[in-house]
Image (cartoon, rainbow, N blue to C red):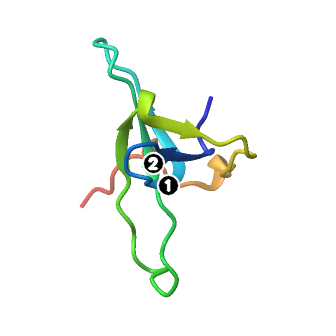
Amino acid sequence: MNLGKKAEDRITGFTGTITGYVQYITGCNQYLIMPRCKKGEENTKPDGHWVDDNRVTIFDNPRMEIDKDSSIGADLAPPKE
């Protein structure tokens, strides 16, 4: 699996970390590439982009790992009021 690896869109040069992958019945599979924040803008959230898998170059670097046990991910119930 390529989640957590660095990647680049060959057409636009857009680079970042792969944080998602989707596979469609039509074969138009895509990676979600999230860029790093720019210097001085660390408190903003940059937009990621879905890119067709045949446009993506995946770099051979160690995968970024995230501790999922301490995450507040989508597996939790929404707040109730």
- Left or right of residue 10, residue 71 in this image: right
- For residue 3, above or below residue 66: above
How far is disc 1 from disc 2 in space, using C-alphas? 7 Å
| Residue nearest the observer in this picture, 9 or 31 | 9
Q: Local crowd at mark 1 within 10 Å, few (<14), some, or many (≥20)?
A: many
Where residue 21 appears, as percent x and y from the top left, is 45, 33
- Furthest toward the top, the residue is 25
First along the sequence among labels 1 and 2 = 1
Q: Residue at x 55, y 38 (%)?
A: 57
- Furthest toward the left, the residue is 81
Where residue 24 appears, as percent x and y from the top left, is 32, 19
Q: Residue at x 45, y 48 (%)?
A: 33
Rendered-image quadrant of the C terminus: bottom left
- For residue 12, above or below residue 29: below
User: Helix or strand or loop: what does disc 2 sit on?
Assistant: strand
What amino acid does circle 1 point to? Thr
Q: Local crowd at mark 2 within 10 Å, few (<14), some, or many (≥20)?
A: many
Labelled disc at residue 33: 2
Where residue 29 appears, as percent x and y from the top left, is 38, 24
Q: On the image, which quarter does residue 44 sit in? A: bottom left
Rendered-image quadrant of the N terminus: top right
Q: Are marks 1 and 2 in contact (CB under 8 Å)?
A: yes
What amino acid does circle 2 point to? Ile
Q: Nearer the viewer, mark 1 or mark 2?
A: 1
Labelled disc at residue 40: none
Q: On the image, which quarter does residue 9 sit in? A: top left
Q: On the image, which quarter does residue 3 sit in? A: top right
- Furthest toward the bottom, the residue is 40
Labelled disc at residue 15: 1
